[in-house]
Amino acid sequence: MTWASRIRLLAGTFLVLAVAAVATLNLNDSRGRATSDSAQILAETYAVGTPYAGLVADQLVDVGDVVAEGDPLFVIDSASLTYDLTNGLVADPPEFTQLDENGRLVVLASGAGRLTQVAAARGTFVPPASTLATVQREGMLHVQAEYTLTAKEYARLPGGADVTIMLPNEATLEGHVEQVDVTTVDGQAQAVVRIASDTLVDGAANGLVSAGTPVVTQIKLTNDGVVTTVAESLRTYVDGLRR
């Protein structure tokens, strides 16, 4: 065998080993992640209601308005409230309401947020315990994701696991697992995962970060082993060279 043949053989061997190493690292990396079947951004909301029936004398807010806790939202002219107050059946109006100078019931916001729905307009009659509006709570966006996991994958799902959230424009946000609800179907875990992230700011990413936006999420699973150890060492070494 000539030296040229030996060099070609050695180069070919190194190439095969390099390709095999990259393939092994990629396979190991994919084994360490679980991708959602479906996921979307959700928001926590609260209903604005009136404890008394009456006429909506004034509608002070509309859809899209931002409110703070204690802001007046609706004014209700309620004969039943007037009767209760006059006859001493109640001493004060209910929580998150107050009386105006005309003795009408003013419904207040119970928390900061943004109006997403208004169900009662000025001039309409509303029954007791009815919903006047819906408010999306400020800073309460989260992601709900559904996963189908094998028993082994579920066993490698750590509490508070890191999650990558991919928006429709392929921008990514980082989050963590906050809660997992799981049922077993045909030997597999059907997991509904609540994901929290400080980067879920309503209206960010040109409006993509908002309730109802579909996303793709990937949970980082526990992935111990020799390959993982070697891969982490290589990443640490490469990061050190870049610095």
Image: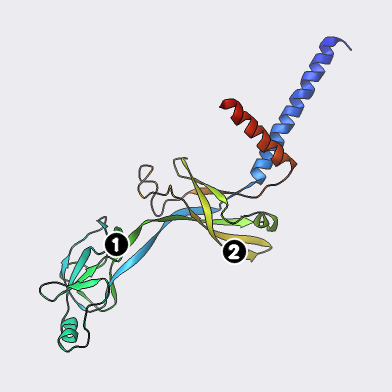
Q: Residue at x 23, y 72 (%)?
A: 97
Q: How many marks?
A: 2
User: Splitting the image into 4 quarters, where does residue 138 fall?
Assistant: bottom left
Say which of marks 1 and 2 sits in front. Answer: 2
Helix, strand, or loop for circle 1? strand
Return the residue at label 2.
Answer: 182
Q: Earlier in the sequence, mark 1 or mark 2?
A: 1
Return the residue at label 1.
Answer: 117
Residue 215 place in picture, x, y as percent: 48, 49
Dot 1 alpha-carbon crowd within 10 angstroms: few under 14, some 14 to 19, many 20 or more: some
Do residues under tags 1 and 2 come within 8 Å of each other at their CB atoms? no
Residue 26 place in picture, x, y as percent: 66, 37
Q: Residue at x 17, y 84 (%)?
A: 85
Helix, strand, or loop for circle 2? strand
Residue 35 place in picture, x, y as percent: 58, 49
- Residue type, label 1: Gln
